[in-house]
């Protein structure tokens, strides 16, 4: 077994590697300077890099090295995530002016260029995975997974449900479906991508998928909750926005206390999935356990 | 050798197959009915299906059968092409209200849903290629090709050049670069995709790439020309629009007569490329020759 990093070491080391990879390679990926600037602006706006970090955390769990090719495939996910934020912020969608504490892409570059920057990042994500120096079967499984998770049966469907149902109160079942698409599908893919890159067996893939699904749901519940109990400075975006826009949220359905309960139950689900992953005692899933710390509510 | 269809038979038979494939499979490809309706509206708005037809014409040239899997991979290109039209028509881009004689996607569904319909179609194109029952190496070569052609070094770059340079007069060199991205890259991919699916050798791939590049350029020159000398009814969209918007066009640089000369020279380039393809007399490229009839100017 290689040396295992603890959670803080892991985040510090690999967030830097992801950021360096993005800064080095994004500027070479386009032929129009205006377009590349718009793409790079949002990618380099200081995201947490949660999704590629989840992929790499699975690699460490399986004791698989983070090679440049695996880093490339993992980091492609950040391109795709950034596209979804740029399009989501557009005037025709959520019309947000602030993201990660900075003006949103269309405020800076105009809605036309922001649309193209998103289109470019989405397409480039596929190019980065397809051109990574990995076994072709692994690349194909990644592309099958990400295209399904991000497409009209996944993320885009969640977004479409969202814009169609603002000002209509959704049932809990429908809200779960909305979130499973809008944020859940891509986070679940991030986790299972780590399994694909690690050569996980079918039982391990199922456990990773369960952990990823619970993680994605917890992420959305936490985000809804922070919109109510967080503050603008800490979040880097406007809070108390969902209620003003009559968005469908967990606190809207269950109140703050009920939402915290749901969050905690979902975290437990994720922990249980990790126990299944680790049932043969071959794997040390402590890093993936640590990723759930994010959802702790400060009293 | 199988039975070869002549041009009219080929177009009739395969346009029907492409349309049937789209109608049958698009509705199953998404989980939100509103989104699927918006996607299907533009896909089924009666396009010529030029790009998948070019792919299939290469198959016939190489005497390779159009199996369901190859049809799926070829038809994915129409999803991607339709996404580019939907986003291009958006208020923040060209702000077109009419396309193929019908209201554009955002006029019908709103700009938010139109943005998502485009995002969904782009992503679904990759899913269709990745899930086609073809050798994994072929699928990967198709994905590498289409992601590069459609991305920020190809089509999206051409679009970005276009929106940044309306009202700025471009040089001929810059205009060629704009068109090579905006329309050329995807048409060239359509032709080379046929080579990939036919197992073409390196010399054949080079000839197909040259034919595809010339075809794409001729297509754009012809489109510019028809905006000046065509009429709205025949084109299914508003003409004389480019000049009003101070778009960079061939007639703007060379006048009508000069543009017709450029078009004819480009068609000759495409014909020369086919001679190279057919240099060992193994292939009958007459169908690809017939595809150039499209660019004949009626006197």
Image (tube, coloured by chain):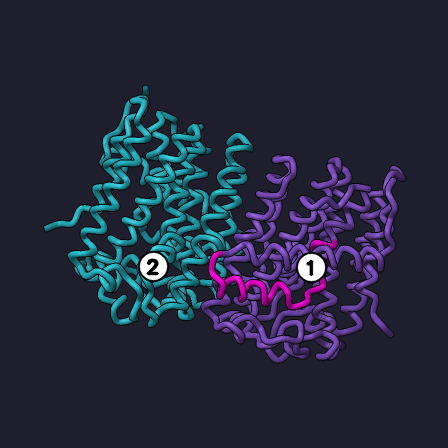
Chain colours: A purple, B cyan
* Neighbours of disc 2 within 10 Å: few (<14), some (14-19), many (20+): many
Q: Which mark is residue A82?
A: none
| Nearer to us in this view, B66 or A10 | A10
Specify the quadrant that holds the N terminus of chain B: top left
Q: Residue at x 69, y 46 (%)?
A: A68
Q: Is residue B180 above or below residue A110?
A: above
* Neighbours of disc 1 within 10 Å: few (<14), some (14-19), many (20+): some
What element does badge 2 sit on?
Answer: helix
Q: Is residue A101 visible?
A: yes
What element does badge 1 sit on?
Answer: helix
Between marks 1 and 2 in the image, the one whose residue lies nearer the viewer: 2
Q: Which mark is residue A19?
A: 1
| Nearer to us in this view, B23 or B11 | B11
Q: Tell me whether circle 1 and circle 2 mark residues in contact (CB < 8 Å).
A: no
Q: Is residue B31 visible?
A: no
- Magenta residues, start to end: A31-53
The reply to whether the magenta stretch includes residue B13 is no
Is the stretch drawn in magenta largely helix, strand or loop? helix
Q: Residue furthest left?
A: B299
Q: Residue at x 75, y 76 (%)?
A: A234
State left or right for residue A210 relative to residue B45.
right
Q: Residue furthest right?
A: A281
Q: Residue at x 26, y 54 (%)?
A: B221
Q: For mark 2, what is the residue?
A: B175
What chain does badge 1 belong to?
A
Q: At which x and y percent is residue A229?
A: 76, 77
Q: At which x and y percent is residue A212?
A: 73, 51
Q: Is residue A212 above or below residue B284?
A: below
């Amino acid at each position: 077994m290689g040396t295992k990093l603890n959670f803080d070491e892991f985040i510090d080391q690999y967030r830097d590697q992801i950021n360096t990879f993005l800064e080095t390679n994004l500027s070479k990926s386009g032929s129009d300077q205006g377009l590349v600037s718009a793409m790079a602006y949002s990618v380099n706006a200081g995201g947490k890099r949660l999704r590629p970090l989840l992929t790499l955390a699975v690699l460490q769990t399986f004791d698989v090295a983070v090679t440049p090719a695996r880093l490339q495939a993992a980091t492609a996910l950040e391109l795709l995530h950034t596209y979804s934020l740029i399009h989501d912020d557009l005037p025709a969608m959520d019309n947000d002016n602030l993201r990660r504490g900075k003006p949103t892409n269309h405020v800076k570059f105009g809605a036309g260029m922001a649309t193209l920057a998103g289109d470019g990042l989405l397409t480039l994500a596929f190019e980065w995975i397809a051109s990574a120096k990995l076994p072709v079967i692994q690349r194909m499984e990644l592309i099958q997974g990400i295209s399904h998770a991000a497409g009209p049966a996944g993320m885009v469907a969640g977004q479409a449900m969202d814009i169609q149902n603002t000002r209509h109160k959704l049932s809990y079942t429908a809200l779960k479906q909305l979130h499973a698409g809008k944020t859940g599908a891509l986070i679940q893919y991030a986790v299972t991508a780590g399994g694909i890159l690690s050569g996980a067996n079918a039982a391990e893939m199922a456990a990773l998928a369960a952990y990823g699904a619970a993680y994605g749901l917890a992420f959305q519940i936490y985000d809804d909750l922070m919109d109510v109990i967080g503050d603008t400075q800490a979040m880097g975006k406007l809070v108390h926005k969902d209620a003003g826009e009559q968005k469908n949220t967990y606190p809207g359905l269950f109140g703050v206390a009920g939402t915290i309960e749901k969050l905690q139950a979902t975290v437990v689900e994720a922990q249980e999935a990790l126990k299944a992953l680790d049932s043969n005692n071959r794997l040390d899933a402590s890093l993936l356990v640590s990723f759930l710390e994010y959802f702790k509510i400060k009293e």
